[in-house]
Image (spheres, helix red, strand yellow):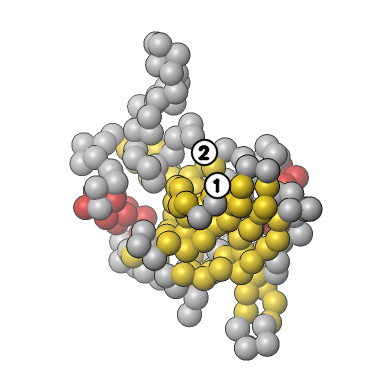
Amino acid sequence: MIRSFVLISLIGMAGAVSAQPNGESRPLMPVWHTDARHCVWVWREGGGVGLWAETCHLPTGRWEVAWDGGQGAFRLRRDGEFMGVVVQSWQVRPEAGIEALTKALIDAGQLAPDADCRWVSVAARPVVRTQALHALSPKAPGAFLPTPQGDVPDPLCGPYGASTHGVRYFILDLRWPGRAVFVDEGQERPMFDPASITVMP
């Protein structure tokens, strides 16, 4: 199912929180599904982050977003096999802001030291007023245009940067000093609710 403005609005509505029996608060469970007959929502936690994610039994297999401790990230999993990273928390110096992530990505081998990229504010979806979304994007105009051979170009800013392969960004939130949370929504509506992403106390 292709993302639409209406679906993004529904995702944004899930930002409300509800009290849980243990006294903690978490976002309300989303009202939408990838497939209402074959998918259920599960609250997942890992690495100090919580989110609502789907588990789906589809003709193509069992799909879910699950915590991968070895990778230190939530990853899409199909029939038990981990695939790409969809949500991952990164440490940043609170006073340094999003720019501090450039060095962190280079040190982690996820960004070429000479990559001609810059941080830009994006409006990928509605957010609460304490949040801002940032993407690492190529400076060169036309960086996302097909090659002369008609191929889709590789992401110039690495696997955590903006690309033609899907919607990627980092969340900064005044309530989470010292954290930046990477989100890869993919090309279609993700099997997790981006608005539900919460850094646990």
Q: In the picture shown, does residue 156 fall above or below 131?
A: above
Residue shown at 68% from the left, 37% from the top: 2
In the image, what residue type sits under mark 2? Gly
Residue 96 appears in the picture as rendered: yes
Q: Relative to residue 35, is residue 44 depicted above or below?
A: below
Which residue position holds label 1? 185
Whether residue 7 sits left or right of residue 118 in the image: it is right
- Asked whether the beta carbons under mark 2 and mark 1 sit within 8 Å of each other, the answer is yes
Q: Quarter of the image holding residue 179?
A: bottom left
Residue 166, numbered label: 2
Q: Amino acid at mark 1?
A: Glu
Q: Say which residue appears at 67% left-offset and 52% top-offset.
A: 57
User: Which sits in the foreground, 122 or 35?
Assistant: 35
- Residue 148 drawn above or below residue 166: above
Q: Is residue 83 left or right of residue 154?
A: right
Image point (34%, 38%), residue name: 157
The secondary element bearing badge 1 is classed as strand
CA–CA distance between discs 2 and 1?
6 Å
Query: Toward the viewer: 194 or 131?
Result: 194
Position of the N terminus, as image quadrant, is: top right
Is residue 33 at all visible to an observer of this figure? no
- What residue occupies the far top of the structure in this picture? 148
Going from N to C along the chain, the mark reached first, 2 or 1, is 2
